[in-house]
Amino acid sequence: MSTPTGTVAAPDRGTTNLTTMDFVVYLLLGIYLGVVFMKSEVVAWFRIQEMFRFQAFHMYGIIGSAVIVAAASVAAIKKLGVKDAHGNPITIPPKEMGKGYRYWIGGTIFGLGWGLLGACPGPIFALLGSGVSVMIVAIVGAMLGTWTYAALRPRLPH
Amino acid sequence: MSEFLTQPWPWYVAGPLIGLLVPMLLLYGGKQFGISSNLRHLCAATYPGRFDFLKYDWRRSGLWNLTFLGGILIGGFIGGVLLRNPDPIAISQATVADLQALGIQDFTGYVPEDIFSWSNLLTPSGLIIILGGGFLVGFGARYAGGCTSGHAISGLADLQLPSLIAVIGFFAGGLIATHLLLPLIL
């Protein structure tokens, strides 16, 4: 997470270079998520349309149950004070509120894209893997958006 | 078992499986689930330009996440090709009717060929939805400091108010795109 104003922090704490074990674990976790994305159809433009038209519970059930399971896990990890597999303490830095502009303006802009494209960043890549090759153009678009943000960042309210 | 693998998975199976990724990443490497940071890493790796925002050691902070992203790509192939559900996605009849009224005819895949095809890319609807939609997703995710995974899953799970505001924004934008913009574009 970058700080809202001023200095640009690294997106998250770098530890060390990836070991072969790290590489395998992160790759497998990504494969796991990609398979769940496809099998649950959250990658489907149709499912996102159905969600934004309030015509099925499917997406709400997925997001809601994912948040509940994740929240219970995070609470347990904090309560127990467990360390990660590398022996480091687990900390979750809070997102800085600042004036809050970035969250509602940026969030709404993201939502406009999500509603049109029917896919957020993870599903864009999963769809590409499943053979929807034109998604490469969406990735180029998303990178152009990221560069544009990088260029405008000093002038945007955060 | 093989039937379970090729059938679509219900929400109460898929949701918890996605949620479990948050503790798995934390417990293994103290990492936070957030996919759109990879767009920043990709930009930093290819063309950081003169932007302070893209000048950092992307290998050190992002290589794990880019590896994870590569896994998602492979998982997309496994889940979407090898374990593909042979039937069309069972969306509600009301959604089918709404989308047919907008001119969508292909309901066979994950995305309608009417929009998401190379032959449609260079039409106004293709450019706005695929390239423009991608642009808004990339710009908005970085401006908001996260996407569906970073804010809606990780952030909400950690009870962070900024993430709740962002998620309300995600839905507001999605509703505007669905109900106001798509009828104009399609």
Image (cartoon, rainbow, N blue to C red):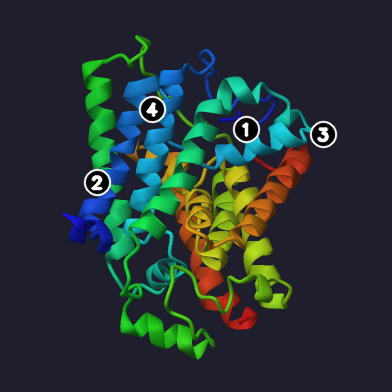
Q: Which residue is mark 2?
A: B16
The percent position of residue A126, horizontal first and vertical second, equals 47, 52
Circles 3 and 4 on the same subunit: no
Q: Are marks 3 and 4 in contact (CB under 8 Å)?
A: no
Type of amino acid under label 4: Val
Type of amino acid under label 1: Pro
Q: Which residue is mark 4?
A: A25
Type of amino acid under label 2: Pro
Q: What residue appears at the point 59 percent right and 60 percent down from the top-left corner?
A: A133
- Pair 4/1: label in front: 4
Q: What residue appears at the point 48 percent right and 48 percent down from the top-left corner?
A: A122
Circles 4 and 1 on the same subunit: yes
Left or right, A40 with respect to B149, comes to left
Circles 2 and 4 on the same subunit: no
The percent position of residue B165, horizontal first and vertical second, equals 47, 48
The image quarter containing residue B10 is: bottom left
The local crowd at label 4, few if under 14, some if 14 to 19, many if 20 or more residues have their Cα within 10 Å, is some
Q: Which mark is residue A4?
A: 1
Q: Which callout, 2 or 3, points at the residue further toward the start of the chain? A: 2
Type of amino acid under label 3: Gly
Left or right, A78 with respect to A94, comes to left
Q: Which mark is residue B49?
A: 3
